[in-house]
Amino acid sequence: MMKINKERHQIVCFEYNDLIYKAYIYKDGELVFSVTGDEYQLGLLDKDDPLWRDFEPPTILEMTRLIEGLQQPIAVIRKIARHIAQYLERHQPVYIYFQLFDDPRRYSFYMRLLRRYPQLLKKYDLYTDEAKETVMLIKKH
């Protein structure tokens, strides 16, 4: 679920296939992606679920843990990445980090995405933890 913290800056917000995608950067430097849609669109509810059969309207949710870069349309991922790169170029924060959680495929996917922005990688050093679950970009001096 979303972090409860009002000290964040929205980097991008757009709609694609009836879902709303957003990226935020929090005051502590964490980069968070979210997707907003109803429970059926987010894959939390299927047509066999009693809520669906009883025709109760699905609840609209904003989720962060469900953002699977590997399952989102490549156009969505590229657009988010482009806006983040533009944000970093314009604002040049000292550091940012994001969580990859527990899927090793995410690490290679996001590294390929970062390599699309060589001008950004010239300005930031890239660090990961041993488990490759957290990626941090720290501005070079």
Image (cartoon, rainbow, N blue to C red):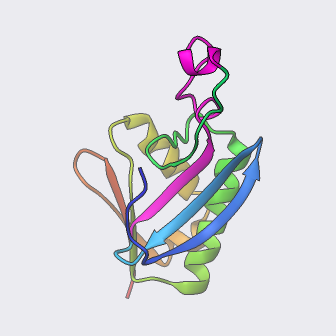
Q: Residue at x 68, y 53 (%)?
A: 78
Near-viewer residue (140 or 73): 73
Magenta segment: does it hold 72?
no
Question: 94 or 41: which is nearer to us?
Answer: 41
Q: Position of residue 118 (x, y in %)?
A: 58, 67
Q: Position of residue 16 (x, y in %)?
A: 76, 47
**Residue drawn at 64 percent across, 58 percent down:** 80
Rendering coords of residue 8 (x, y %): 47, 75
Q: Is residue 51 magenta?
A: yes
Residue 51 lies left or right of residue 129; in this view the side is right
Count of numbered labels shown in the rendering: 0
Q: Is residue 17 left or right of residue 106?
A: right
Identify the residue shown where x is 62% and y is 33%.
58
Does 50 appear above or below 19?
A: above
- Left or right: 78 as drawn, with respect to 99: right
Which residue, as the protein is rendered here, is positioned at the far left? 130
Q: Is residue 51 above or below residue 134?
A: above
Residue 123 or 15: which is nearer the viewer?
Answer: 15
Seen as rendered, the residue at the extreme top is 48
Write the start and end of the magenta stretch as one range: 30-54
Vertical arrangement, residue 84 with respect to residue 17, above or below: below
Quadrant holding the C terminus? bottom left
Q: Quadrant of residue 6?
A: bottom left
Q: Position of residue 11 (x, y in %)?
A: 60, 71
